[in-house]
Structure formats: C-alpha cells, structure tokens
Amino acid sequence: FTTKTGTFKPPQMQPLKAMARTTPEVLRLFHMRLRSSKFDESIHAAEAIRSVAHKEPGLLDPEQLKRDLSLLKELGNTQAATHIRLAISKAAKVKRTEHYRYGF
C-alpha cells in the first residue's frame, strides 16, 4: 500500500504487523487502508489483518472487522472481504487482548 512516505509491499509489512501489539495505531492504519479505492492496497491491508488474526486474534475487534467486511462488500472487493471473513472467525473465538503502550 502507499503512504506519504512510500509504498509498502507484503514483506515490508512484517515490521508493521509486529508493531501492532505495542502500537494500536498500526492496526488503525490497516483498517484505513481497507477503504482504499485501489483494490491491491485494500487487499494487502486485509492480508495483514488476517495475518494478525492468525497470530494474535485477541488484538482485533470482531465488531470493527464486521464493519470492515460490510464496507468491502459495498465496494465489491471480494478478495479483501475473504481475508476479513477469516480474521473475524479467528477474532470472534478469543478474548480481546489489552494493547501495551509505552509510557502509559
């Protein structure tokens, strides 16, 4: 996906996914990228969210994921929607994990 500072491809997203636990804003970045008009960007974000769901599903809010899924359906992005469906199934089965924030 593309930001003001550059384009992130899936291998470069690994550090971002690793930061998701200590920096909840990273997850918000992925959720924002789902709304991209460029399908490849939203698919990459959905893949990242699915990866987080696989490793640490408690970090994700199933209700937020359901809202994301509805939006992706409206946009007709079936590939990203599939990744989010898988993330929902993982996140809905576990208790939410508290995010740790440095300095708080």
Image (cartoon, rainbow, N blue to C red):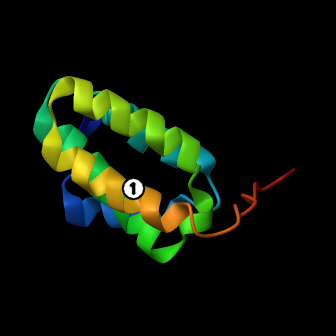
Q: What residue appears at the point 46 percent right and 44 percent down from the top-left corner?
A: 65
The answer to whether 87 appears left or right of 42 in the picture is: right
Q: Is residue 56 above or below residue 83?
A: below
Q: What residue appears at the point 23 percent right and 39 percent down from the top-left corner?
A: 42
Q: Is residue 67 above or below residue 14?
A: above
Q: Is residue 70 above or below residue 17?
A: above
The answer to whether 67 appears left or right of 51 in the picture is: right
Horizontal and vertical percent position of residue 90: 47, 67
The quadrant of the rendering that contains the N terminus is top left
Q: Is residue 15 visible?
A: yes
Q: Which residue is mark 1?
A: 49
What amino acid does circle 1 point to?
Ile
- Please rate how many residues cluster around mark 1, counting C-alpha atoms within 10 Å: few if below 14, some from 14 to 19, many from 20: many
Please tell me which residue lies in front, 78 or 54. 78
Q: What residue appears at the point 54 percent right and 71 percent down from the top-left corner?
A: 56
The answer to whether 29 appears left or right of 59 in the picture is: left
